[in-house]
Image: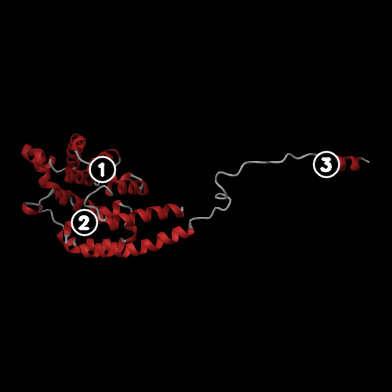
Amino acid sequence: MASTNAVNYQEEIARPVANFPPRLWGERFINYTSGTQVAEEFAEAIEVLKNEVRNVLIGSNSNFVGALSLIDTVERLGISYHFENEIEKILQLFVELRTNNYEDEAYDLYTVSIHFRVFRQHGHRMSSDTYSNIYIYIRMSENSKKALKSDPKGLLNLYDAAHMRIHGEEILEDALVFATSSLKSMAPNLGSPLRQQVLHALVQRLHFGRPRIEARNFISIYEKDESRNETLLMFAKLDYNLLHMLL
């Protein structure tokens, strides 16, 4: 008897009809598919661009400053892991050029700074005496100070290089103080994108940031640079987006 009442009770239950309006998004989320096809297209484009960038790197080994500048850009864009062998071969070619003599026509703040930083960054021995002339100018000559302060790009590279110092390198300690104060004073008057790069560097030191975040930031700066290499820029953007799709 009890079981019969239970059955009748269940049959008498009235279920409301859910008459909902059509979905605003259609079947988009129900039929969601991963971006596998897009990722494959990105990967194919990246392979083509990778060969182009590799050729650019190999072709740069006849120009010392140009090669180091290119390596620096590739590393800042976050794509250097594709070209570790090529980069090391280029640096090996220039090992014999490592010298402390940056006088006369060879003396240039940008050249000295990027030479020191890139080589030391890759584990090559570089003496801080590289900056001996700069050190003397900073300490002894107001005219030379003014000359250095008219070179914001060189000062920015000096600032980045000085953060590669080790304990007891007084030259780099003084260079860092000088570069920091100079960049802070000139930053408001710099044009974009150099101003953006300087302001970011003063807040976030190059070697202490998260690589992916720093790469994303530099991509936004580099795309505003009139001297940018479009192949490098496109490769960096595709590589960055692909890595995020694969996470």
The residue under label 3 is which amino acid type? Answer: Gln
Residue placed most toward the observer, 80 or 48: 48
Pointer 3 residue: 10
Give the alpha-carbon distance from disc 2 to disc 3, as whole Å: 80 Å
Pointer 2 residue: 68
User: Which residue is found at the position 17% from the left and 59% from the top?
Assistant: 64
SS type, badge 1: helix
Q: Does residue 70 lie above or below 224 as drawn?
A: below
Q: Are marks 1 and 3 in contact (CB under 8 Å)?
A: no
SS type, badge 3: helix
Measuring from the top left, give residue 212's x and y in whole percent. Answer: 37, 49
Q: Quadrant of residue 80?
A: bottom left
Q: Quick one: label 1 or label 2, which is nearer the N terminus? A: 2
Q: Are marks 1 and 2 in contact (CB under 8 Å)?
A: no
Position of 97 with respect to 163 (left or right) is left
The residue under label 1 is which amino acid type? Answer: Gln
The residue under label 2 is which amino acid type? Answer: Leu
Crowding at label 3, few (<14), some or many (≥20) Cα neighbours within 10 Å?
few
Q: Quadrant of residue 48?
A: bottom left
Residue placed most toward the observer, 99 or 40: 40
Q: Quick one: label 1 or label 3, which is nearer the N terminus? A: 3
Q: Does residue 4 lie above or below 243 as drawn?
A: above
Q: Which of labels 1 and 2 is toward the front?
A: 1
